Amino acid sequence: TLPISHCQTKEGPPQLDLEKGLEMRKWVLSGILASEETYLSHLEALLLPMKPLKAAATTSQPVLTSQQIETIFFKVPELYEIHKEFYDGLFPRVQQWSHQQRVGDLFQKLASQLGVYRAFVDNYGVAMETAEKCCQANTQFAEISEVLVTLNKDAKDQTTKNSLETLLYKPVDRVTRSTLVLHDLLKHTPSSHPDHPLLQDALRISQNFLSSINEEITPRRQSMTVKKGEHRQLLKDSFMVELVEGARKLRHVFLFTDLLLCTKLKKQSGGKTQQYDCKWYIPLTDLSFQTVDESEAAPNIPLVLDEELDAMKIKISQIKNDIQREKRANKGSKAIERLKKKLSEQESLLLLMSPSMAFRVHNRNGKSYTFLISSDYERAEWRENIREQQKKCFKSFSLTSVELQMLTNSCVKLQTVHSIPLTINKEDDESPGLYGFLNVIVHSATGFKQSSNLYCTLEVDSFGYFVNKAKTRVYRDTAEPNWNEEFEIELEGSQTLRILCYEKCYNKTKITKEDGESTDRIMGKGQVQLDPQALQDRDWQRTVIAMNGIEVKLSIKFTSREFSLKRMPSRKQTGVFGVKIAVVTKKPRSHRPAVGCAGLRQVGYAPISALLADNKDVSVMMSEMDVNAIAGTLKLYFRELPEPLFTDEFYPNFAEGIALSDPVAKESCMLNLLLSLPEANLLTFLFLLDHLKRVAEKETVNKMSLHNLATVFGPTLLRPSEKESKVPANPSQPISMTDSWSLEVMSQVQVLLYFLQLEAIPAPDSKRQSTLFSTEV
């Protein structure tokens, strides 16, 4: 029997919880063993060339000197011996597993030997520098360093080629993750178990070691205090992300009546007042939005994967839950303040990593600067405000160092945006916004003066900043576009819906290109407030948004997450919808509900079209149906299953498995869980997984990445049935981010995304395999 989540309600049987938690402990340890095997193979690959290099060093034609070999491979043999001893001790104990089995002494000893890693890390920079010089000086060593072979013990006769640089980084990466492994193991070790104090001691040693090698001394800069200048006024200010030599930096940008000022908020220490450092400024008469040279390549924007952003959001949700729990328990304010500090750090990181839309400004004296923004609406506002003010500026100037200091210091009092726009800065009694799904139909638009190619985009605020969520098709050669397109947008504390209307410019050579970005021209923009009370009844509401003489007609409908994903078992047990998969697949010649996929090139939501039925004529029937309708049918089918495809029994385990820190342990756990699903569920999922991957292959056309597909289908495949749900039953109450709901939904998305990203899933046993690849329906 597989374990259930260790997070049980107070009513759950304590003994059962203990046994299940101990069983999960074995899963974690099995994953650690697999991870150790991989690490040992990397160390072996480093040791392999050492012997011949040392032998050659004593000859008349050495490849490297003995000193160079010692520097490059410093402490690698010692690390290998330490981990070989650890692995040899852990392996038999896991093989002869019982709930009383002890392993804490092994982890405690491993932690006590971290001093070897200290020596390795201290030498790492010199080792890399020496290796690089030796590669340049000796072609034979350069060839050796590029093709170090790592044996893959999981697959017979398979090897992986790694560079010396990659393998030398492995110990650095390993030691930085040592505390994560211990956290995972402690999480599933009851406090009454003899291992608990030993693992806690190992964790303490590891944490102290990590903090000692991660310490950074930030140079303190001289403070400035001067009074506000009288001749200029502040028009607008905002936190923005600047791209500096490929790195993202958080800035506070101020638009004055005669210049644009970019500042950095200085770190504050106990009781000191807020202060800014000036990074640069541009007089408005010298500022333009055009690039210096059209032939010059725009700086590459370092993109952050959607799943990395989701991981940040999960952390934020976890910390918010912890804050609410502390408040309910009436714990001391110190604990809450510590959590709020962690929350602020995580939300600042999310704000820093999220934007990907370039906003470039250029000083005619030669220097260009690039900001990253999440919202085209806000980018357009900055441009409009700057251009409007430029009409009133006629003379260039430069500031003396004293004037610049005065101006920068005045920003502390003049600023209108006092804190990063994140949820932590919102008061508890402030409206939390909406959490759920907003369906928007973009009907049509009027008021254009001439025919052109027109489309709209939709933005909503999420986690404190605006993001683009949807885009209509381009309606060509018209002054009265009728899109009539519907979008489902996930809301995460959202309070505002924005819409932008663009003219699509196909002949880009005739258009003045700004910022090196899209040449499409914004024709108008507007927004509507999302009122929780007005939208709570789940009925469609029509609205008209006026923008710059243009009117866009919309219909909007809000559905709370609780209602949208509620499972509704079918009363008609002879049908397909709302009936357990095991019942459907008991029918003759049916091993899984029939799923057909077509329309992979369909653009927008509904890249996959599928229909679930009881007969083998389904593919003929599908070809005559609307692709969007069929996609909705597939999602509806999985939503209406009495229990999720991943089952109520295994759902907590998948949530536990996806949270594991060590990638090898995670893979071992997740695959074992997947292959333990009931046969009909497993085969249906593998069939669906194969089709979703093929959909993602057409991402350039259908705009559906693996992450987008996981967001659409994850909750419908994993959301537990009503009796297992922790969500409040009253759908009329807006669901707060501080509830566990958001955390659950993100976890469900992460589970499906994990399987979508796996290169290969081991085939089921022969009986299952023959069924899976059967062509029968």
Image (tube, helix red, strand yellow):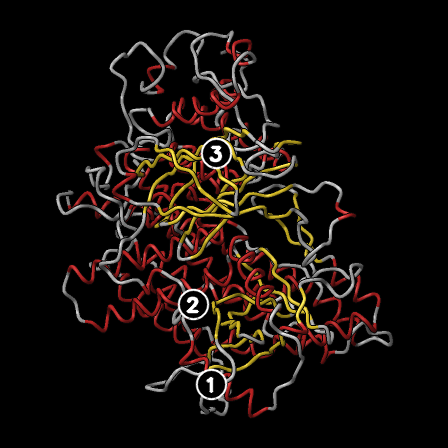
Residue at the spot 51% in from the left edge and 66% down from the top edge: 240
Rendered image: mark on residue 442: 3
Residue type of the residue flagged with mark 1: Asn
| 432 horizontally vs 485: left or right | left
Residue type of the residue flagged with mark 2: Leu
Helix, strand or loop at mark 2? helix
Residue type of the residue flagged with mark 3: Val
Could you tell me if the residues under marks 3 and 2 are in contact, i.e. CB atoms within 8 Å? no
Q: Which residue is mark 1?
A: 409
When the figure is inspected, residue 642 is found, relative to residue 50, above or below; the finding is above
Helix, strand or loop at mark 3? strand
Q: Residues within 10 Å of mark 2 (few under 14, many from 20)?
A: some
Residue 265 is at least partly visible in this image: yes
Viewer-proximal residue, 712 or 351? 351
| 271 horizontally vs 70: left or right | left
Residue at the spot 63% in from the left edge and 76% down from the top edge: 282
Numbered disc in front, either 3 or 2: 3
Q: Position of residue 39 (x, y in %)?
A: 55, 58
Sequence-wise, the earlier of marks 2 and 1 is 2
Q: CA distance from mark 3 to mark 2?
A: 61 Å
Sequence-wise, the earlier of marks 1 and 3 is 1
Residue at the spot 24% in from the left edge and 68% down from the top edge: 336
Quadrant position of the N terminus in the picture = top left
Residue at the spot 47% in from the left edge and 67% down from the top edge: 238
Q: Position of residue 122 (x, y in %)?
A: 57, 79
Rendered image: mark on residue 215: none
Q: CA distance from mark 2 to mark 1?
A: 52 Å
Q: Which residue is mark 2?
A: 110
